[in-house]
Image (cartoon, rainbow, N blue to C red):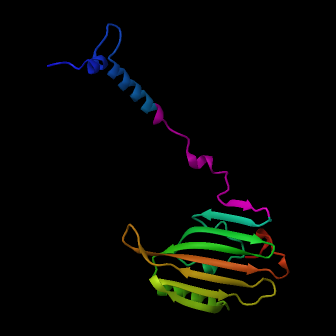
Amino acid sequence: MRKNPRLERFTSVGPSSLPILTRLTLGLLAGSLVACRKMPDPVAQEVDQDPVRRHIGKDGTHFEASLGDARALPPQFPPHLQLPNASIISSGQIRDREGGLASLILQTSQPLEAIAAYYRRTLWGRGWDLLSDLEQAGGIRTLVFESPPRPDRPPQQAVIQVGSPRRGPDQVEYRDILILLSTVVPGGEAQPAAAAAP
């Protein structure tokens, strides 16, 4: 059988050296041990970092956003807008001197009628007016509410849009819920987010 000179060069043993293939194997093994050494925990490095992303535009508009929690919502965001037993996907807000817009995205496996019934019952029970309840193609439903007039708080409008159903990896049907809460401040002097009452 004819030997391959190129292969023989990698596997032959010289008088004072290991075969090249063996040396390459040892080098790769050492490299993999270095690569698999315990790395610093990335979570521990980010403990001191604020999970809310903040930005102030050139015109003074404030932007805040957070993934997986409601930390970016303003304190005056009504807690009853968060559907019970729903997962929080993200939260955010935009505010300037004229008011603000807060957003919350939820995910739930609850049926459409149960979601709509919760908001109609809960907000109406707190004096909110239902301005619109619109069913759209694809199983989308949009509800619009307006808060009752109060002397200590500017009026608010809530748009609640329940998205089309989609099947998850567990074969359960899920829906995303987008909640937008707008606040318009008369006179154009919005409260700082931290100073507003819950």
Tell me the residue at 60%/66% (across/down): 69
As drawn, the residue found furthest toward the top would be: 15
- Against 137, is 101 above or below? above
Spot occupied by residue 183 in the image (x, y as percentages of width and height): 73, 79
Residue under the image location 80 percent in, 65 percent down: 60
Residue 97 in the figure: left or right of residue 16:
right
| Residue 145 visible in the picture | yes
40 and 138: which one is in front?
A: 138
Front-most of 78 and 29? 29
Between 167 and 70, which is closer to the camera in this rendering?
A: 167
**Residue 141 versus residue 98 in the image, above or below:** below
In the rendered structure, does residue 12 fall within the stretch colored magenta? no
**At which x and y percent is residue 129?**
66, 92
**Res. 25 image quadrant:** top left
Quick check: can you spot residue 78? no
- Residue 37 magenta: yes
Q: Point out the stretch of residues depicted in magenta.
A: 34-58
Residue 175 horizontal/vertical position (percent): 48, 76
Quadrant in which the C terminus appears = bottom right
Image label count? 0
Q: Is residue 178 above or below residue 59?
A: below
Q: Is residue 76 left or right of residue 1?
A: right
> Is residue 129 found left or right of 62 in the rendered image?
left
Q: In which quadrant is the N terminus drawn? A: top left
Secondary structure of the magenta portion, mostly? loop
Residue 34, compared with residue 157, is above or below; it is above
Specify whether 159 is left or right of 35: right
Residue 39 screen position, x and y as percent: 52, 39
**Residue 67 placement: quadrant:** bottom right
Residue beneath the point at 80% across and 80% down: 185
